[in-house]
Image (tube, rainbow, N blue to C red):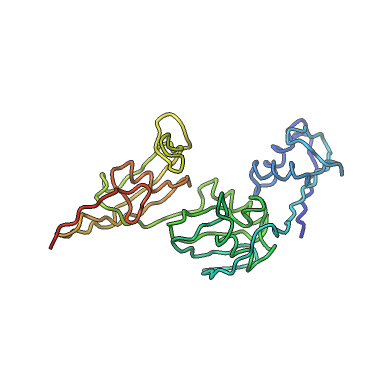
Amino acid sequence: MNNSIKLLVPEKDEGKRLDIFLSNNVDHLTRSNIKKIINSKHVTINKKVAIFPSKKVKNNDLVELKIKNKPTNKLLANKINLNVHYEDNDIIIIDKPKGLVVHPGAGNNKNTLVNGLIYKYKDKLSNISGNLRPGIVHRLDKETSGLLVVAKNNLSHSKLSKQFSDHSIRREYLCLAFGVIRPLKGKIDTLISRSKYNRQLMSVSDVRGKKAITNYETIKVFYSNKIPKVSLIKCKLETGRTHQIRVHMKYKGISLLGDNQYGKKKIKFKKS
């Protein structure tokens, strides 16, 4: 199925880059999405394929952008019990359980959420994120449970991507953590990058990485004579960096229950 968008370049836009012109006039596509579409040779100017995103447009040029869904038959289809929370013609909302990897990666090409999606929906998914991540707009860590939005077509994918980019989608998570965060409510605003000591982990950095913002609020602190204090914390994300909540909680001196990567190696329990 193809979705075609045709635009006539007005005089005021003459001399602009093709990718900038399109991103300014097609509000549901990000510039990065548009570059991918141009590089895939799905944009024409006056019926000739545009090769470079930097191509300058001229007055009265006819620009046509084709968004094409391609079958993703390179992936192995696995029958997985998908807990579909909501579905319509454009999106699927899945309640992802703890322990399920979202998409295939190095050394793991089966039994992921994507393999289950391919089994159930075949080629009826967006392909903007590439053949290995059909429908995937965002992801959750393997050990994180929660709602995950999947796009059925490229138009809905682009609109969702823009909402994530604009932070107009509200993402909130409830966490149980050992310890009490101070202050009880606040905002964590840091850079997050790959750890210099373990490339599989992320860490807060003062000089490098991507901006990460987590708003948090302590809902309740649980006290017991036999176990350490446990806090129920609500986290609202303004960004979506890899391992963001776990990294920010560690940065504040606490760790999530069950977190074997960033959590404390040993927790002391009092004997009865």
Q: Residue at x 38, y 52 (%)?
A: 235
State the residue in front, 64 or 249.
249
Q: Nearer the viewer, residue 60 or 96?
A: 96
Which residue is at the front of the view, 36 or 118? 118
Residue that protrudes farthest toward the front in the picture: 107
For image coordinates 55% across by 62% down, the residue present is 111
- Which residue is outermost to the left? 272
At which x and y percent is residue 97? 46, 64
Name the side, left or right, on which 8 lies relative to 233.
right
Residue visible at 34% across and 56% down in the picture: 258
Q: Is residue 204 above or below residue 71?
A: above
- On the rendered image, what quadrant is the N terminus found in? bottom right
**Residue plotted at (51% across, 69% down):** 83
Q: Estimate the x, y position of residue 200 in percent, counting from the top left.
A: 46, 43
Q: Which quarter of the rendering shows the C terminus? A: bottom left
Report the number of discs: 0
Most extreme residue toward the right, as rendered? 47
The picture places residue 204, in percent across and down from the top left corner, at 39, 37
The vertical placement of 141 against 186, above or below, is below
Q: Position of residue 120 (x, y in %)?
A: 63, 69
Q: Compare residues 179 and 50 and report the one nearer the observer.
A: 179
